[in-house]
Image: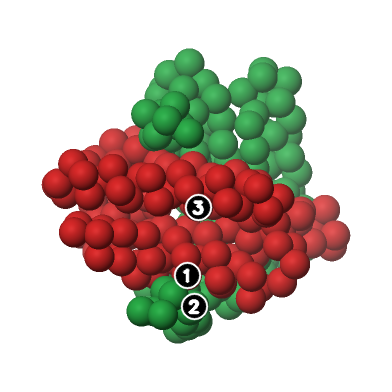
Chain colours: A red, B green
Amino acid sequence: MKYILMMNTMKAGHGVPSWPKKDLQAHIAFMIGLNKELHERGELVSAEGLSFPDQAKLVHAGKDGRPVTDGVFPESKEFLAGFWIIDVDNPQRAYEIAAKASAAPGPGGVPLNMPIEVRQVMSGPPPDML
Amino acid sequence: MKYILLMSGTKAGVEGYHAWPKQDIEAHMAVLHSINQDLTDSGEFVATQGLAEPKEAKVVRGEKNGLPVTDGIFPESKEFLLGYWIVEVPNAERAYAIAGRISAASVNMPIEVRQFATHEAKSR
């Protein structure tokens, strides 16, 4: 079963966090270690970090089909900071991995315990929609 | 340059989609398939996925003991990721053009376009 674990922790307009450099390094080292562990267990499908919300654009098609871009988002919007796609035996394992990612170290090495959204990835659209 | 195009919607929006006539859903899926095919032919396609229904979503936090705490309660206004496309394109404008096509195929719904954090990709 494939799951996507999403860190929706960024707010509109934010750039690089203003943490002390060593705390940022410890956070990134933790994430690299987690990815390595998941890879070694054969559970990692992919993991990506996204550029910061100040670079995000919202696109919709205009009447003539041309893309209309906008960079204005509501203050309350949560931005995807990064995600993991994992292939695991059951949802409980997905939740375990999400909890591990949740506890990544933040400023001063204190676990962030940030919320991680866990969703199953569909292998394709339902057959009656094809 | 890799970009992710994110399609999001609320639970109410997803329910509205399920109420579409079958032929409209089929036409919508057919256009999305043709976009995937075009991106494959142009060498820009990296990946695409649809996600399971928002009602199946859970949010997980690590507790002090490291054990997972799961919750499935979300505000009504929350926008859930419905699906995404990852594309590799020469510039941002091309990513916006693809997002515009996907939008046009999907009742002009907004598509969020984000670049991957390349500096992190290099360090892995």
Q: For the residues carrying marks 3 and 1, which lies nearer the camera in this image?
A: 3
Check disc 1 and give the amino acid type: Ala
- State the mark number for residue A68: none
How much space separates mark 1 and mark 2, taking CA atoms? 5 Å
How much space separates mark 3 and mark 1, taking CA atoms? 12 Å
* First of labels 3, 1 by sequence position: 3
Residue A18, image x, y percentages: 14, 47
Helix, strand or loop for disc 3: helix
Q: For the residues carrying marks 3 and 2, which lies nearer the camera in this image?
A: 3
Q: Are marks 1 and 2 in contact (CB under 8 Å)?
A: yes
Chain containing mark 2: B
Position of residue B95 relative to residue B68, above or below, is: above
Position of residue B73 relative to residue A75, above or below, is: below
- State the mark number for residue A99: 1
How much space separates mark 3 and mark 2, taking CA atoms? 16 Å
- State the mark number for residue B68: 2
The answer to whether any part of residue A68 appears in the image is no
Helix, strand or loop for disc 2: strand
